[in-house]
Amino acid sequence: MRAAVPSPAVPAEDGRTRDRVSGLLLEHGPQSAAELAARLGISPAAVRRHLDGLVATGRVDERVAPGGQRGRGRPARRFALTDAGRSSFPHAYDDLALTALRFVAEHGGPDAVRAVAEKQLSGLAERCSTAVDDALADAERDGATAPVDRAQVLATALTTEGYAATASAISSGGQLCQHHCPVAHVAAEFPQLCEAETAVISKLVGTHVQRLATIAHGDGICTTHIPAQLTPTSRNKATPARPVPAGSAVAHDAGASTSSTPSIDRERTPA
């Protein structure tokens, strides 16, 4: 599930009123500004200001009310929660996922949990792979001389999926940072989710990678080290600019080793 669009900073009182507006739309369905104002006991103009803020953040959708025109004035407008608006309310998805994975672990063992994790991430891998392949194809068509930065393309694709990802270059290669993890609470108990995700990253950037930090284990962000600069040799292959020394640390099952950590700065969210 994609994450809801984050709301900009608003005064606490405005935030509480917008939460009340969202709650009324969840409880009673689509309503006009006048109907909401009557329920809240504030003016329609004040309600419209809050609705404008909710529409801007993608939590509420504005539409013409059934029945069309209202006299000579503007058409009657009604407001309804979007999927993003609904997702901002508490859900029991984490509890359900944990219960299901505990059952799988009890009856099938760790390998069965890993298979579930890989299946769950297969759709994400396919969508991100398409984004990387499209970027490579565009570069070939445009005759670009510089290699496509797969990590940057992947960061953009992951952000679209709700991971709030960024990529940056460092002296020993690059770093992919994910500032949000949609499954952090579940991955804290089942690290197979992190391992499967690391395998996806490794495949998409075309080299072994190393997970340095994860939100699931209490770090501020998920940080993945991508060693060396990649030199693309075709649309679907990439060769490391320098070979990996024998005996160096690489991640198991696609790169999640935690030993022999490279000497690089780890990005953390300030305490």
Image: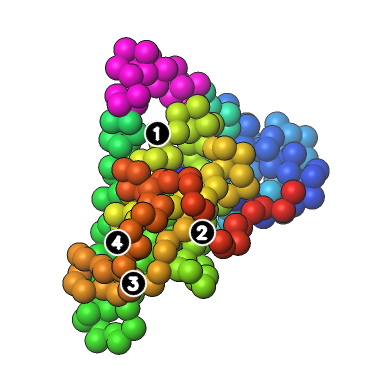
Residue 26 place in picture, x, y as percent = 56, 31
Real-space CA distance between mark 4 and mark 3, rounded to the nearest whole angstrom: 13 Å
- The rendered magenta stretch, by its main secondary structure, is classed as helix
Q: Mark 2 points at which residue?
A: 262
- Which comes before the other along the chain, label 2 or label 3? 3
Type of amino acid under label 4: Gly
Residue 48 visible = no
Q: Name the residue under label 4.
A: 206
- Quadrant of the drawing holding the N terminus: top left
- What residue is drawn where x is 78% and y is 40%? 42
Type of amino acid under label 3: Arg
- Which comes before the other along the chain, label 2 or label 4? 4
Q: Relative to 69, does residue 148 appear above or below in the rendering?
A: below
Residue 92 versus residue 243: which sits nearer the camera? 243
Type of amino acid under label 2: Pro
Residue 16 place in picture, x, y as percent = 75, 39
Q: Name the residue under label 3.
A: 242
Type of amino acid under label 1: Gln
Indicate left or right for 68 with 129 as reference: right
Q: What element carries label 3?
A: loop
Q: Relative to 246, does residue 122 appear above or below in the rendering?
A: above
User: Where are the magenta residues, as a range?
Assistant: 93-113
The answer to whether the residue labelled 4 contacts the one labelled 3, judged by CB atoms less than 8 Å apart, is: no
